[in-house]
Image: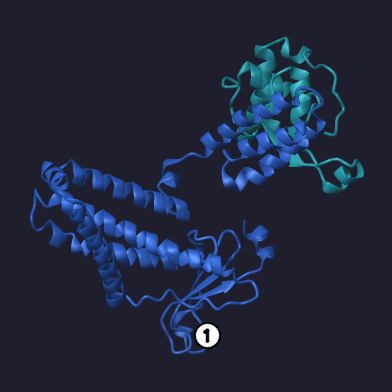
Amino acid sequence: MSSEAKLSHTAAIILQAIDAGHVYGFSVMEETGLPSGTVYPALRRLERDGLIRSQWESQRIADNGQRPPRKYYKITRAGKVTLDASQKRYPLLARLFPAHAGENA
Amino acid sequence: MLRTLQIAILRNAALLVPAPERGEWLAEWRAELYYVNHDATAFCFGSFRDALWLRRKSFNVRRMFSLDSPLRCVMFLTAAAVLTSLCAFGFPSLKSLLEACSPSGIEQFALGCAGLYAESLLVLVTLNPLELGEYPANQYAPSLIVRVRRWIFLNVKIILLTSIFLFASIALLPLFPPAGLILFFPWIAGLRWALADQKQRCPVCLHLLSNPVKIGSPARSVLDWYGTELVCARGHGFLYVPGAPTTWCNRQRWQYLDSTWSTPLA
């Protein structure tokens, strides 16, 4: 999907956050400072466009941590291409979340 | 207390999410809420925007006019009945007729409607045997209330269809006197549709059955069953419709399934 031109600044920030290792909705919210009403619909749009994909954490891992299983998001190859294009367009984007957070990616 | 309120907000927002995605959507938001340690209520209010986005995404005209759900079917027929009644009341001749109506006249009109309903049932039974097939009860069969609900649904459809044609003939009568007679045939067709539609619905959830699959071959009907198998998408059961009536299988037959089927078929 060639969506470089269609990716809004907000969507690009969210994609960058996911690529940086913030793989849960709430983690993306905390890193970007965007409200939940913006982050979650954006995640769904990105997933619909094939730029990210979601996967539920296994119940066993969640049970071990005594918490509910989470849905985590991962950038796809198409998402990576789009993100690279967005970084050329918004040069400061790559500097927003430079280090990988190392969450459960 | 606050957590209960937050869950309630999420549950309310979930009502906006299309039914097939609702469970997973709510699970995700509840899981995320578990980790929120500040402004959790504001976080929950954001779910409405997410739910609305999913609702908008799922919206399509074809689905909107689909009569798959029993509620949508009844709403569609009600809307048609209201529309035809508005057409009927819009004509000056009928307006003056209603204005001149005394309470006893209205009573007579109501009696006439009831008579028409009884007549429609009679016509339906005469032209089409009022049998919907075999629904043998097993241990997974629903309660009596659920089974009665199915007959209520059929009667509501018949009443609404009869109202539609009654109002349509009233509306057209001043313009075209033989309208009443001409509309008799579409009315019969409508009643037949009501019955055929009922036969294509799940007796438990009343949704239309889906995924028809042809089974067997007419050339082998002596040795084996052939016909069409339909399934309830919510896993309530299978419907077997014989390709040709035989002495041992002359009507459609429903098979109730246990609740474990709801997940694989969903």
Position of B54 relative to B236 (above/below): above
Depth check: give the residue in front, B223 or A84: B223
Question: Position of B257 compared to B68: left or right?
Answer: right
Depth check: give the residue in front, B117 or B83: B117
Q: Quadrant of the C terminus of chain B?
A: bottom right
Q: Which residue is mark 1?
A: B224
Chain under callout 1: B
Q: Position of residue B95 (x, y in %)?
A: 15, 43
Position of B101 relative to A79 (above/below): below
Position of B121 relative to B218 (above/below): above
Q: Position of residue B256 (x, y in %)?
A: 59, 71
**In the rendered picture, chain A carries what hue?**
cyan
Q: Quadrant of the N terminus of chain B?
A: top right
Question: Position of A66 compared to B145: left or right?
Answer: right
Question: Position of B151 compared to B93: left or right?
Answer: right
Position of B212 relative to B28 (above/below): below
Which residue is at 31% across, 75% downward? B125
* Label 1: element kind: loop
Q: Position of residue B213 (x, y in %)?
A: 51, 68
Question: Position of A70 compared to B218: left or right?
Answer: right
Colour option used: by chain
Which residue is at 64% across, 71% downward? B140
Q: Position of residue A54 (x, y in %)?
A: 72, 38
Categorize mark 1 by other alpha carbons within 10 Å: few (<14), some (14-19), many (20+).
Answer: few
Which residue is at 75% across, 33% downward? A74
Which chain did the image draw in blue? B
Q: Is residue A85 visible?
A: no
Please tell me in which quadrant of the rendered image residue B54 appears: top right
